[in-house]
Amino acid sequence: MSGDVEAKNMKPSNTRYWVVVFAVVLAVIQYIDRVCISKSKGAIQADLQLDDIAMGKVLGAFALAYALFEIPSGWLGDRFGPRKALIRVVLWWSFFTIATGWVGGLISLVVVRFLFGAGEAGCFPNLTRAFVNWLQPHERVRAQSILWLCARWGGAVTPLLVLAVLRWFKGAGFEHPWRQSFFLFGALGVVWTLVFAWWFRDNPKDHPGVNAAEKELLAPNAAYASGHGSVPWGVFASSKAAWLLWAQYFCLSYVWYFYVTWLPDYLDRHYHPKTDADQTYLTLIACLPLFCGGIGCLISGFVTKKLSTLSGGLRQARRLLATVGMLGTCAAMAYLALSDTTKMSALTFGLVLGAASMCGDFTIPCSWGACMDVGGRFAGTFSGTMNMMGNFAGFVCPYLIGYAAKGEQWNLVFGSMAVAAFLGALCWITLDGVTPLDGGTAESTV
Protein backbone atom coordinates (compact mmCIF):
# COMPACT_ATOMS: atom_id res chain seq x y z
CA MET A 1 0.00 0.00 0.00
CA SER A 2 2.79 2.43 0.93
CA GLY A 3 4.42 1.69 -2.44
CA ASP A 4 1.20 2.69 -4.26
CA VAL A 5 1.01 5.94 -2.32
CA GLU A 6 4.67 6.65 -3.01
CA ALA A 7 4.17 6.05 -6.75
CA LYS A 8 1.17 8.41 -6.84
CA ASN A 9 3.14 11.18 -5.15
CA MET A 10 6.22 10.69 -7.32
CA LYS A 11 6.92 12.19 -10.71
CA PRO A 12 7.47 9.37 -13.25
CA SER A 13 11.01 9.00 -14.53
CA ASN A 14 11.54 9.22 -18.28
CA THR A 15 13.78 6.20 -18.67
CA ARG A 16 11.43 4.75 -21.31
CA TYR A 17 12.43 7.43 -23.80
CA TRP A 18 15.96 6.04 -23.93
CA VAL A 19 14.45 3.06 -25.73
CA VAL A 20 13.56 5.45 -28.55
CA VAL A 21 17.14 6.75 -28.57
CA PHE A 22 18.54 3.21 -28.87
CA ALA A 23 16.03 2.45 -31.61
CA VAL A 24 16.87 5.59 -33.58
CA VAL A 25 20.62 4.95 -33.43
CA LEU A 26 20.14 1.35 -34.54
CA ALA A 27 17.83 2.37 -37.37
CA VAL A 28 20.47 4.80 -38.65
CA ILE A 29 23.16 2.10 -38.46
CA GLN A 30 20.89 -0.40 -40.19
CA TYR A 31 20.24 1.99 -43.06
CA ILE A 32 23.92 2.90 -43.39
CA ASP A 33 24.84 -0.78 -43.61
CA ARG A 34 22.02 -1.43 -46.08
CA VAL A 35 22.41 1.58 -48.37
CA CYS A 36 26.21 1.80 -48.53
CA ILE A 37 26.35 -0.84 -51.28
CA SER A 38 24.36 1.36 -53.67
CA LYS A 39 27.05 4.06 -53.65
CA SER A 40 29.84 1.46 -53.90
CA LYS A 41 28.07 -0.47 -56.66
CA GLY A 42 30.09 0.94 -59.54
CA ALA A 43 33.43 0.14 -57.89
CA ILE A 44 32.23 -3.33 -56.91
CA GLN A 45 31.05 -4.07 -60.45
CA ALA A 46 34.35 -2.88 -61.91
CA ASP A 47 36.52 -4.86 -59.48
CA LEU A 48 34.47 -8.06 -59.64
CA GLN A 49 33.53 -7.69 -63.33
CA LEU A 50 29.76 -7.83 -62.79
CA ASP A 51 27.19 -6.59 -65.30
CA ASP A 52 23.86 -4.95 -64.43
CA ILE A 53 21.90 -8.21 -64.39
CA ALA A 54 24.43 -9.82 -62.03
CA MET A 55 24.28 -6.78 -59.74
CA GLY A 56 20.49 -6.97 -59.77
CA LYS A 57 20.82 -10.52 -58.45
CA VAL A 58 23.11 -9.31 -55.68
CA LEU A 59 20.71 -6.57 -54.61
CA GLY A 60 17.76 -8.94 -54.90
CA ALA A 61 19.50 -11.57 -52.73
CA PHE A 62 19.55 -9.14 -49.81
CA ALA A 63 15.88 -8.27 -50.18
CA LEU A 64 14.84 -11.92 -50.56
CA ALA A 65 16.61 -12.91 -47.34
CA TYR A 66 15.25 -9.82 -45.60
CA ALA A 67 11.76 -10.92 -46.56
CA LEU A 68 12.15 -14.60 -45.70
CA PHE A 69 13.58 -13.96 -42.23
CA GLU A 70 11.14 -11.24 -41.14
CA ILE A 71 8.68 -13.68 -39.56
CA PRO A 72 11.28 -15.88 -37.79
CA SER A 73 13.03 -12.78 -36.45
CA GLY A 74 9.79 -11.18 -35.26
CA TRP A 75 8.73 -14.46 -33.65
CA LEU A 76 12.03 -14.68 -31.77
CA GLY A 77 11.40 -11.26 -30.27
CA ASP A 78 7.85 -12.17 -29.27
CA ARG A 79 8.92 -15.53 -27.85
CA PHE A 80 12.19 -14.69 -26.09
CA GLY A 81 12.09 -10.91 -25.83
CA PRO A 82 13.57 -8.16 -28.02
CA ARG A 83 16.81 -7.97 -25.99
CA LYS A 84 18.07 -11.44 -26.95
CA ALA A 85 16.74 -11.12 -30.48
CA LEU A 86 18.32 -7.74 -31.19
CA ILE A 87 21.71 -8.70 -29.75
CA ARG A 88 21.84 -11.72 -32.03
CA VAL A 89 20.62 -10.11 -35.23
CA VAL A 90 22.76 -6.96 -34.96
CA LEU A 91 25.94 -8.97 -34.38
CA TRP A 92 24.95 -11.24 -37.27
CA TRP A 93 24.38 -8.49 -39.83
CA SER A 94 27.43 -6.51 -38.62
CA PHE A 95 29.62 -9.54 -39.30
CA PHE A 96 28.25 -9.92 -42.81
CA THR A 97 28.62 -6.20 -43.46
CA ILE A 98 32.30 -6.67 -42.72
CA ALA A 99 32.36 -9.89 -44.78
CA THR A 100 31.13 -7.95 -47.83
CA GLY A 101 34.63 -6.48 -47.98
CA TRP A 102 36.12 -9.99 -48.26
CA VAL A 103 34.17 -11.26 -51.28
CA GLY A 104 35.97 -12.37 -54.43
CA GLY A 105 33.22 -12.80 -57.01
CA LEU A 106 29.53 -13.02 -57.82
CA ILE A 107 28.73 -16.19 -55.87
CA SER A 108 30.40 -15.11 -52.65
CA LEU A 109 28.84 -11.64 -52.92
CA VAL A 110 25.34 -13.08 -53.40
CA VAL A 111 25.79 -15.44 -50.44
CA VAL A 112 27.17 -12.75 -48.14
CA ARG A 113 24.43 -10.25 -49.02
CA PHE A 114 21.77 -12.92 -48.55
CA LEU A 115 23.09 -13.69 -45.06
CA PHE A 116 23.41 -9.98 -44.34
CA GLY A 117 19.74 -9.53 -45.25
CA ALA A 118 18.77 -12.42 -42.98
CA GLY A 119 20.25 -10.52 -40.05
CA GLU A 120 18.84 -7.10 -40.88
CA ALA A 121 15.35 -8.63 -41.09
CA GLY A 122 15.19 -8.67 -37.30
CA CYS A 123 15.68 -4.95 -36.78
CA PHE A 124 12.31 -3.23 -37.11
CA PRO A 125 10.00 -6.04 -35.90
CA ASN A 126 11.98 -6.26 -32.67
CA LEU A 127 12.22 -2.50 -32.23
CA THR A 128 8.45 -2.43 -32.67
CA ARG A 129 8.14 -5.09 -29.97
CA ALA A 130 10.41 -3.04 -27.68
CA PHE A 131 8.12 -0.02 -28.18
CA VAL A 132 5.08 -2.11 -27.26
CA ASN A 133 6.83 -3.22 -24.04
CA TRP A 134 8.19 0.17 -23.02
CA LEU A 135 5.93 2.95 -24.30
CA GLN A 136 2.42 4.07 -23.51
CA PRO A 137 -0.12 3.56 -26.31
CA HIS A 138 -0.25 7.25 -27.26
CA GLU A 139 3.57 7.41 -27.45
CA ARG A 140 4.11 4.51 -29.83
CA VAL A 141 3.17 6.00 -33.20
CA ARG A 142 5.12 9.17 -32.56
CA ALA A 143 8.07 6.99 -31.61
CA GLN A 144 7.64 5.15 -34.90
CA SER A 145 7.51 8.42 -36.84
CA ILE A 146 10.73 9.63 -35.17
CA LEU A 147 12.33 6.22 -35.75
CA TRP A 148 11.53 6.23 -39.46
CA LEU A 149 12.47 9.89 -39.86
CA CYS A 150 15.94 9.11 -38.52
CA ALA A 151 16.14 5.86 -40.47
CA ARG A 152 15.32 7.65 -43.71
CA TRP A 153 17.74 10.47 -42.93
CA GLY A 154 20.40 7.92 -42.02
CA GLY A 155 19.89 6.43 -45.46
CA ALA A 156 19.87 9.91 -47.00
CA VAL A 157 23.29 10.87 -45.65
CA THR A 158 24.79 7.46 -46.39
CA PRO A 159 25.74 8.23 -50.03
CA LEU A 160 27.63 11.32 -48.84
CA LEU A 161 29.16 9.37 -45.99
CA VAL A 162 30.25 6.53 -48.28
CA LEU A 163 31.67 9.01 -50.79
CA ALA A 164 33.73 10.68 -48.06
CA VAL A 165 34.90 7.33 -46.66
CA LEU A 166 35.85 6.02 -50.12
CA ARG A 167 37.85 9.18 -50.84
CA TRP A 168 39.58 8.95 -47.47
CA PHE A 169 40.59 5.32 -47.91
CA LYS A 170 41.70 6.03 -51.47
CA GLY A 171 43.82 8.94 -50.23
CA ALA A 172 45.30 6.62 -47.61
CA GLY A 173 46.59 4.40 -50.40
CA PHE A 174 44.10 1.51 -50.34
CA GLU A 175 43.70 -0.12 -53.75
CA HIS A 176 40.05 -1.13 -53.25
CA PRO A 177 38.60 1.42 -50.76
CA TRP A 178 35.07 0.00 -51.01
CA ARG A 179 36.29 -3.07 -49.10
CA GLN A 180 37.60 -1.01 -46.17
CA SER A 181 34.36 0.99 -46.07
CA PHE A 182 32.39 -2.18 -45.27
CA PHE A 183 34.83 -3.02 -42.47
CA LEU A 184 34.23 0.39 -40.93
CA PHE A 185 30.45 0.36 -41.24
CA GLY A 186 30.19 -3.17 -39.83
CA ALA A 187 31.99 -2.08 -36.67
CA LEU A 188 29.21 0.42 -35.84
CA GLY A 189 26.72 -2.35 -35.06
CA VAL A 190 29.14 -4.12 -32.75
CA VAL A 191 29.56 -0.97 -30.64
CA TRP A 192 25.79 -0.45 -30.47
CA THR A 193 25.25 -4.05 -29.36
CA LEU A 194 27.68 -3.78 -26.45
CA VAL A 195 25.95 -0.67 -25.06
CA PHE A 196 22.44 -2.03 -25.69
CA ALA A 197 23.18 -5.36 -23.99
CA TRP A 198 24.38 -3.52 -20.90
CA TRP A 199 21.40 -1.12 -20.68
CA PHE A 200 18.24 -2.71 -22.06
CA ARG A 201 15.72 -4.93 -20.24
CA ASP A 202 12.69 -6.57 -21.86
CA ASN A 203 10.44 -5.53 -18.97
CA PRO A 204 10.64 -1.90 -17.76
CA LYS A 205 10.09 -3.00 -14.14
CA ASP A 206 13.44 -4.79 -14.24
CA HIS A 207 15.37 -1.66 -15.17
CA PRO A 208 17.05 0.18 -12.25
CA GLY A 209 16.41 3.56 -13.86
CA VAL A 210 12.61 3.17 -13.86
CA ASN A 211 11.11 4.60 -10.68
CA ALA A 212 7.90 3.44 -8.99
CA ALA A 213 5.73 6.05 -10.73
CA GLU A 214 6.98 5.10 -14.19
CA LYS A 215 6.50 1.41 -13.36
CA GLU A 216 2.88 2.14 -12.50
CA LEU A 217 2.53 4.17 -15.70
CA LEU A 218 3.74 1.21 -17.75
CA ALA A 219 1.99 -1.50 -15.75
CA PRO A 220 -0.64 -2.15 -18.48
CA ASN A 221 2.22 -3.23 -20.78
CA ALA A 222 3.06 -6.17 -18.51
CA ALA A 223 0.89 -8.51 -20.59
CA TYR A 224 3.11 -7.78 -23.59
CA ALA A 225 6.48 -7.88 -21.83
CA SER A 226 6.51 -11.64 -21.32
CA GLY A 227 6.93 -14.12 -24.18
CA HIS A 228 4.00 -15.97 -25.72
CA GLY A 229 3.34 -19.42 -27.00
CA SER A 230 1.81 -20.30 -30.33
CA VAL A 231 1.21 -17.64 -32.96
CA PRO A 232 -2.36 -17.45 -34.36
CA TRP A 233 -1.33 -17.96 -37.98
CA GLY A 234 -4.86 -18.87 -38.97
CA VAL A 235 -6.14 -15.58 -37.59
CA PHE A 236 -3.47 -13.70 -39.53
CA ALA A 237 -4.27 -15.52 -42.76
CA SER A 238 -8.02 -15.03 -42.48
CA SER A 239 -7.84 -11.32 -41.62
CA LYS A 240 -8.78 -8.80 -44.30
CA ALA A 241 -6.81 -6.14 -42.42
CA ALA A 242 -3.67 -8.31 -42.49
CA TRP A 243 -3.87 -8.94 -46.23
CA LEU A 244 -4.47 -5.29 -47.00
CA LEU A 245 -1.56 -4.24 -44.78
CA TRP A 246 0.69 -6.74 -46.52
CA ALA A 247 -0.40 -5.68 -50.01
CA GLN A 248 -0.02 -1.94 -49.43
CA TYR A 249 3.45 -2.42 -47.93
CA PHE A 250 4.49 -4.49 -50.95
CA CYS A 251 3.38 -1.64 -53.19
CA LEU A 252 5.12 1.02 -51.11
CA SER A 253 8.37 -0.95 -50.94
CA TYR A 254 8.37 -1.68 -54.66
CA VAL A 255 8.74 2.05 -55.26
CA TRP A 256 11.06 2.71 -52.33
CA TYR A 257 13.69 0.14 -53.26
CA PHE A 258 14.60 2.09 -56.38
CA TYR A 259 15.89 4.91 -54.16
CA VAL A 260 18.34 2.70 -52.28
CA THR A 261 19.51 0.42 -55.07
CA TRP A 262 19.64 1.86 -58.60
CA LEU A 263 19.17 5.60 -58.13
CA PRO A 264 22.87 6.56 -57.70
CA ASP A 265 23.73 4.45 -60.73
CA TYR A 266 20.90 6.04 -62.76
CA LEU A 267 22.20 9.53 -61.96
CA ASP A 268 25.78 8.64 -62.93
CA ARG A 269 24.64 7.14 -66.24
CA HIS A 270 22.45 10.02 -67.29
CA TYR A 271 24.42 13.02 -66.00
CA HIS A 272 28.01 11.76 -66.45
CA PRO A 273 29.91 13.41 -63.57
CA LYS A 274 33.38 14.51 -64.71
CA THR A 275 34.78 16.05 -61.54
CA ASP A 276 34.61 15.44 -57.80
CA ALA A 277 32.26 18.43 -57.55
CA ASP A 278 29.93 16.85 -60.12
CA GLN A 279 29.97 13.58 -58.19
CA THR A 280 29.21 15.33 -54.91
CA TYR A 281 26.30 17.21 -56.53
CA LEU A 282 24.75 14.01 -57.89
CA THR A 283 25.26 12.33 -54.53
CA LEU A 284 23.27 15.15 -52.91
CA ILE A 285 20.51 14.59 -55.48
CA ALA A 286 20.50 10.89 -54.57
CA CYS A 287 19.94 11.89 -50.93
CA LEU A 288 16.72 13.78 -51.70
CA PRO A 289 14.21 10.88 -51.73
CA LEU A 290 15.20 9.53 -48.33
CA PHE A 291 15.56 13.02 -46.85
CA CYS A 292 12.08 13.98 -48.06
CA GLY A 293 10.75 10.58 -46.98
CA GLY A 294 11.89 11.31 -43.45
CA ILE A 295 9.93 14.56 -43.51
CA GLY A 296 6.89 12.61 -44.67
CA CYS A 297 7.24 10.20 -41.73
CA LEU A 298 7.48 13.10 -39.30
CA ILE A 299 4.48 14.94 -40.74
CA SER A 300 2.35 11.81 -40.70
CA GLY A 301 3.23 10.86 -37.15
CA PHE A 302 2.55 14.30 -35.73
CA VAL A 303 -0.64 15.20 -37.59
CA THR A 304 -2.36 11.87 -36.97
CA LYS A 305 -3.79 12.94 -33.60
CA LYS A 306 -5.26 16.17 -34.96
CA LEU A 307 -6.57 14.45 -38.06
CA SER A 308 -8.08 11.72 -35.92
CA THR A 309 -10.13 14.32 -34.08
CA LEU A 310 -11.25 16.02 -37.28
CA SER A 311 -12.03 12.85 -39.25
CA GLY A 312 -13.85 10.93 -36.54
CA GLY A 313 -11.25 8.46 -35.34
CA LEU A 314 -7.81 6.93 -35.75
CA ARG A 315 -9.01 4.40 -38.33
CA GLN A 316 -10.20 7.16 -40.66
CA ALA A 317 -7.12 9.32 -40.05
CA ARG A 318 -4.76 6.52 -41.06
CA ARG A 319 -6.82 5.71 -44.13
CA LEU A 320 -6.85 9.34 -45.26
CA LEU A 321 -3.14 9.99 -44.69
CA ALA A 322 -2.00 6.79 -46.37
CA THR A 323 -4.39 7.02 -49.32
CA VAL A 324 -3.50 10.63 -50.10
CA GLY A 325 0.19 9.80 -49.71
CA MET A 326 0.12 6.85 -52.08
CA LEU A 327 -1.84 8.81 -54.67
CA GLY A 328 0.80 11.55 -54.46
CA THR A 329 3.50 8.98 -55.16
CA CYS A 330 1.45 7.65 -58.07
CA ALA A 331 1.15 11.12 -59.59
CA ALA A 332 4.89 11.84 -59.30
CA MET A 333 5.91 8.50 -60.82
CA ALA A 334 3.33 8.84 -63.61
CA TYR A 335 4.85 12.23 -64.43
CA LEU A 336 8.30 10.65 -64.78
CA ALA A 337 6.91 7.75 -66.83
CA LEU A 338 5.30 10.15 -69.31
CA SER A 339 8.29 12.51 -69.51
CA ASP A 340 11.58 12.36 -71.36
CA THR A 341 13.75 12.11 -68.26
CA THR A 342 16.93 12.26 -70.37
CA LYS A 343 16.16 15.96 -70.98
CA MET A 344 15.26 16.65 -67.35
CA SER A 345 17.79 18.37 -65.09
CA ALA A 346 19.21 16.32 -62.25
CA LEU A 347 17.69 18.72 -59.71
CA THR A 348 14.20 18.50 -61.24
CA PHE A 349 14.43 14.73 -61.38
CA GLY A 350 15.56 14.59 -57.75
CA LEU A 351 12.80 16.92 -56.56
CA VAL A 352 10.11 14.84 -58.28
CA LEU A 353 11.48 11.70 -56.61
CA GLY A 354 11.65 13.61 -53.32
CA ALA A 355 7.97 14.51 -53.61
CA ALA A 356 7.11 10.89 -54.45
CA SER A 357 9.05 9.64 -51.44
CA MET A 358 7.62 12.20 -49.01
CA CYS A 359 4.07 11.34 -50.03
CA GLY A 360 4.73 7.60 -49.89
CA ASP A 361 6.21 7.83 -46.43
CA PHE A 362 2.99 9.31 -45.06
CA THR A 363 2.03 5.63 -44.87
CA ILE A 364 4.99 4.51 -42.72
CA PRO A 365 3.74 5.57 -39.25
CA CYS A 366 0.24 4.45 -40.31
CA SER A 367 1.52 1.01 -41.30
CA TRP A 368 3.70 0.35 -38.26
CA GLY A 369 1.16 1.88 -35.89
CA ALA A 370 -1.41 -0.49 -37.36
CA CYS A 371 0.96 -3.40 -36.71
CA MET A 372 1.19 -2.46 -33.03
CA ASP A 373 -2.56 -2.02 -32.65
CA VAL A 374 -3.68 -4.95 -34.79
CA GLY A 375 -0.89 -7.31 -33.70
CA GLY A 376 -1.11 -6.61 -29.95
CA ARG A 377 1.01 -9.11 -28.01
CA PHE A 378 2.04 -10.62 -31.34
CA ALA A 379 3.25 -7.23 -32.62
CA GLY A 380 6.77 -8.49 -33.38
CA THR A 381 5.58 -11.42 -35.45
CA PHE A 382 2.79 -9.48 -37.14
CA SER A 383 5.01 -6.56 -38.09
CA GLY A 384 7.45 -9.15 -39.41
CA THR A 385 4.79 -10.48 -41.76
CA MET A 386 4.14 -7.01 -43.12
CA ASN A 387 7.82 -6.20 -43.55
CA MET A 388 8.31 -9.60 -45.19
CA MET A 389 5.79 -8.70 -47.88
CA GLY A 390 7.44 -5.33 -48.36
CA ASN A 391 10.81 -6.92 -48.89
CA PHE A 392 9.51 -9.42 -51.38
CA ALA A 393 8.94 -6.26 -53.42
CA GLY A 394 12.54 -5.37 -52.64
CA PHE A 395 13.57 -8.63 -54.27
CA VAL A 396 11.43 -8.05 -57.36
CA CYS A 397 12.23 -4.36 -57.92
CA PRO A 398 16.06 -4.31 -58.22
CA TYR A 399 16.06 -7.60 -60.11
CA LEU A 400 13.67 -6.30 -62.77
CA ILE A 401 15.43 -2.94 -62.93
CA GLY A 402 18.64 -4.81 -63.74
CA TYR A 403 17.06 -5.92 -67.01
CA ALA A 404 15.46 -2.53 -67.65
CA ALA A 405 18.77 -0.74 -67.02
CA LYS A 406 20.51 -2.89 -69.59
CA GLY A 407 17.92 -1.84 -72.19
CA GLU A 408 17.52 1.73 -70.86
CA GLN A 409 13.77 1.16 -70.45
CA TRP A 410 13.39 3.61 -67.58
CA ASN A 411 9.93 4.88 -68.52
CA LEU A 412 8.61 1.36 -67.98
CA VAL A 413 10.26 1.31 -64.56
CA PHE A 414 8.62 4.57 -63.48
CA GLY A 415 5.29 3.47 -64.96
CA SER A 416 5.33 0.25 -62.95
CA MET A 417 6.00 2.31 -59.82
CA ALA A 418 3.00 4.54 -60.57
CA VAL A 419 0.77 1.47 -60.90
CA ALA A 420 2.13 0.00 -57.65
CA ALA A 421 1.44 3.24 -55.75
CA PHE A 422 -2.10 3.40 -57.11
CA LEU A 423 -2.80 -0.17 -55.98
CA GLY A 424 -1.39 0.69 -52.55
CA ALA A 425 -3.84 3.59 -52.28
CA LEU A 426 -6.74 1.24 -53.10
CA CYS A 427 -5.69 -1.04 -50.23
CA TRP A 428 -5.98 1.76 -47.68
CA ILE A 429 -9.52 2.82 -48.63
CA THR A 430 -11.12 -0.02 -46.63
CA LEU A 431 -8.23 -1.02 -44.34
CA ASP A 432 -9.03 -1.31 -40.61
CA GLY A 433 -5.68 -0.57 -39.00
CA VAL A 434 -6.96 -0.30 -35.43
CA THR A 435 -8.97 -3.35 -34.32
CA PRO A 436 -6.77 -6.06 -32.68
CA LEU A 437 -6.75 -9.48 -34.33
CA ASP A 438 -7.04 -11.22 -30.97
CA GLY A 439 -10.46 -9.70 -30.41
CA GLY A 440 -9.33 -7.30 -27.69
CA THR A 441 -10.27 -3.67 -27.36
CA ALA A 442 -8.64 -1.38 -29.85
CA GLU A 443 -6.10 0.98 -28.32
CA SER A 444 -5.50 4.45 -29.68
CA THR A 445 -1.79 4.77 -30.29
CA VAL A 446 -1.96 8.30 -31.60
Image (cartoon, helix red, strand yellow):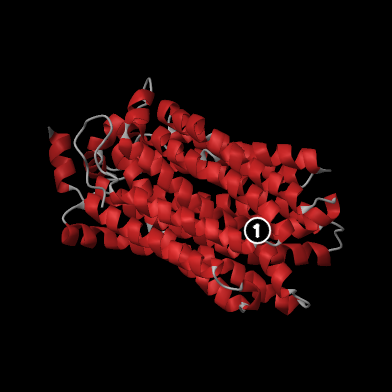
Residue 442 sits above or below residue 402 on the image = above
328 or 169: nearer the eye? 328
On screen, residue 237 versus residue 63, left or right, reads left
Q: Is residue 240 visible?
A: yes
On screen, residue 286 versus residue 39, left or right, reads left
On screen, residue 308 versus residue 54, left or right, reads left
90 or 56: nearer the eye? 56
Identify the residue at image location x=41%, y=30%.
Answer: 78
Identify the residue at image location x=45%, y=37%.
Answer: 384
Residue lying at the far top in this picture: please name it: 230
Q: Is residue 204 visible?
A: no
Residue 250: where, in percent of width, then height? 47, 46
> Disc 1 marks which amino acid?
Trp
Residue 422: where, in percent of width, then height? 42, 56
How many residues crowd mark 1 within 10 Å: few (<14), some (14–19), many (20+)?
many
Identify the residue at image location x=66%, y=73%.
Answer: 282
Task: Find numbered disc 1 in the image and state the secondary structure of the residue it sits on.
Answer: loop
Identify the residue at image location x=12%, y=40%.
Answer: 5
- Mark 1 lies on residue: 262
152 or 216: nearer the eye? 152
Residue 392: where, in percent of width, then height? 54, 41
